[in-house]
Image (cartoon, rainbow, N blue to C red):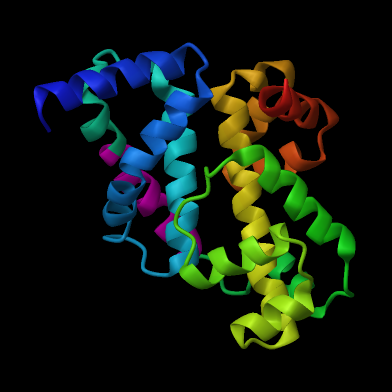
């Protein structure tokens, strides 16, 4: 990385520390590819890679104030990515059954409210969703454009239940991105529970909280819409 690039990254890091969401989005776009490569040494499943990417950036945001040398953001982030991937690999190795929420997506009734929730969260996260496969990204885009589960299934050549699993997985990724937006805007401080949930249970649990918490929802909407 050149001196100019290092200086630019340093400026972005300092801007993120001041609550600049656009600066974080720039860092995210700059490094999401490298983070994906780093976590693939430990996890192979595309869904787990996406989880590791989101968790990496969430951990980095939560610890950014501890980074004494902003110019060393890249190696610092890569170290977080590797450690996060190891943690996720160990956690997944202990899980035998599929996650309950994905089972519900296959077996549960059609729920337009879920599609509405996907559209609502997507409007607030502005591209902070990393690691999605091309299929999952297409499914998410179709829902944002107003298509329903049957349309997604037809477009992707999937069974109806499989399309619901894809969308439920995308919703989980959007929840994680919502947590990222709240952290970067400093909005998490308005909700005393979110940082505690994130610290104790991780970004998946924090995402579930953020989606249903009125305080988190209000903070995210203010950050996006003013």
Residue 174: x %, y % from top left: 63, 49
Determine the residue located farthest toward the front in the rendered image. Answer: 145
Residue 1: x %, y % from top left: 12, 33
Question: In the rendered image of this protein, does residue 79 appear above or below residue 46?
Answer: above
> What residue is shown at x 63% (from left), y 71% (from top)?
166
> What residue is shown at x 44% (from left), y 14% (from top)?
17
> What residue is shown at x 15% (from left), y 22% (from top)?
4
Residue range highlighted in magenta: 78-93
Q: Is residue 80 magenta?
A: yes
Q: Is residue 199 visible?
A: no
Q: Nearer the viewer, residue 126 or 91?
A: 126
Question: In the rendered image of this protein, does residue 49 appear above or below residue 1?
Answer: below
- Left or right: where does residue 9 sit relative to residue 108? left
Question: In the rendered image of this protein, does residue 148 appear above or below residue 180?
Answer: below
Question: In the rendered image of this protein, does residue 183 appear above or below residue 198?
Answer: above
Q: Is residue 85 magenta?
A: yes
- Left or right: where does residue 75 sit relative to residue 27? left
Q: Quadrant of residue 49?
A: bottom left
Q: Main secondary structure of the magenta part?
A: helix
Q: How many marks?
A: 0
Q: Nearer the viewer, residue 172 or 138?
A: 138
Residue 170: x %, y % from top left: 63, 60
Q: Nearer the viewer, residue 174 or 93?
A: 174
- Left or right: where does residue 115 sit relative to residue 12? right
> The C terminus is located in which quarter?
top right
């Amino acid at each position: 990385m050149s001196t100019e690039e290092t200086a630019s990254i340093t400026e972005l890091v300092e801007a993120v520390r001041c609550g600049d969401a656009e600066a974080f989005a720039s860092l995210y776009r700059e490094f999401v590819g490298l983070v994906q490569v780093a976590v693939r040494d430990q996890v192979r499943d595309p869904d787990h890679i996406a989880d590791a990417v989101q968790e990496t950036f969430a951990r980095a945001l939560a610890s950014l104030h501890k980074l004494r040398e902003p110019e060393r953001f890249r190696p610092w982030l890569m170290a977080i990515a590797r450690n996060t991937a190891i943690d996720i690999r160990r956690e997944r190795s202990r899980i035998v059954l599929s996650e309950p929420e994905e089972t519900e997506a296959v077996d549960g009734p059609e729920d337009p409210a879920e599609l509405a929730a996907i559209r609502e969260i997507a409007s607030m996260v502005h591209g902070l969703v990393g690691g999605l496969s091309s299929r999952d990204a297409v499914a998410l885009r179709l829902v944002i454009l107003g298509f329903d589960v049957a349309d997604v299934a037809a477009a992707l050549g999937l069974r109806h239940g499989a399309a619901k699993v894809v969308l439920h997985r995308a919703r989980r990724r959007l929840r994680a991105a919502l947590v990222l937006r709240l952290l970067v805007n400093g909005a998490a401080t308005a909700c005393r529970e979110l940082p505690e949930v994130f610290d104790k249970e991780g970004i998946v649990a924090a995402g579930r909280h953020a989606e249903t918490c009125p305080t988190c929802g209000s903070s995210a909407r203010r950050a996006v819409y003013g």
